[in-house]
């Protein structure tokens, strides 16, 4: 599968269905695995950190089809505004919110309180 990102670069990735995982996917999954309990990252943040700042949607697709859960904690990846988006585990978004709350992520209303809970990798 190929996704064209906003900066004009192609980002290739394949779901783990007997196909080789792309470098992009491997980097995203490895980085997401580092998000600690009680913190979240955004799709765009992960994309930027792996060198593809326009690939937030590609990161979202990788999280949606994460074959490594729970070792890669896709529930800790949220929208830039702190909104909880797409989660296929349990009852969906309510399960994602419960998991994050149990880990200590702070909320303001229905959104993650990004000032308190966004992961800042070293």
Image: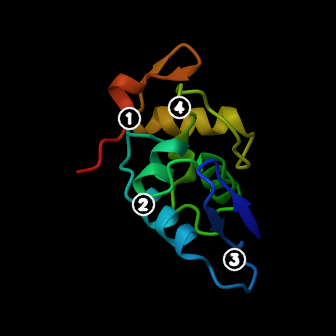
Between label 4 and label 1, give the one nearer the viewer.
Answer: 4
Q: Residue at x 37, y 39 (%)?
A: 38
Question: Mark number for residue 98?
Answer: none
Which residue is under mark 4?
80
Q: Secondary structure beneath disc 2?
A: helix
Which residue is under mark 2?
31
**Is 116 on the left or on the right of 95, as rendered?**
left
Distance from disc 3 to disc 2, alpha carbons, whole Å, reads 17 Å
Residue 61 vs 1, above or below: the answer is above
Which of marks 4 and 3 precedes in the sequence? 3
**Is 1 on the left or on the right of 6, as rendered?**
right
Which residue is under mark 1?
118
Which of marks 3 and 1 precedes in the sequence? 3
Which of marks 2 and 3 precedes in the sequence? 3
Residue 27 vs 86, above or below: the answer is below
Which residue is under mark 3?
16
Which of marks 4 and 2 precedes in the sequence? 2
Residue 71 seen in this snapshot? no
């Amino acid at each position: 599968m190929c996704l064209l990102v906003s900066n004009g670069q192609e980002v290739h990735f394949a779901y783990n269905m007997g196909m080789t995982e792309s470098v992009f996917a491997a980097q995203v999954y490895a980085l997401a695995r580092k998000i600690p309990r009680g913190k979240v990252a955004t799709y765009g943040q992960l994309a930027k950190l792996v060198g593809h700042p326009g690939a937030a949607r590609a990161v979202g697709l990788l999280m949606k089809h994460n074959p490594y859960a729970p070792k890669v904690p896709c529930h800790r990846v949220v929208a830039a505004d702190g909104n909880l988006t797409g989660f296929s585990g349990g009852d969906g978004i309510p399960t994602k919110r419960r998991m994050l709350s149990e880990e200590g992520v702070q909320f303001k209303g229905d959104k993650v309180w990004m000032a308190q809970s966004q992961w800042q990798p070293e």
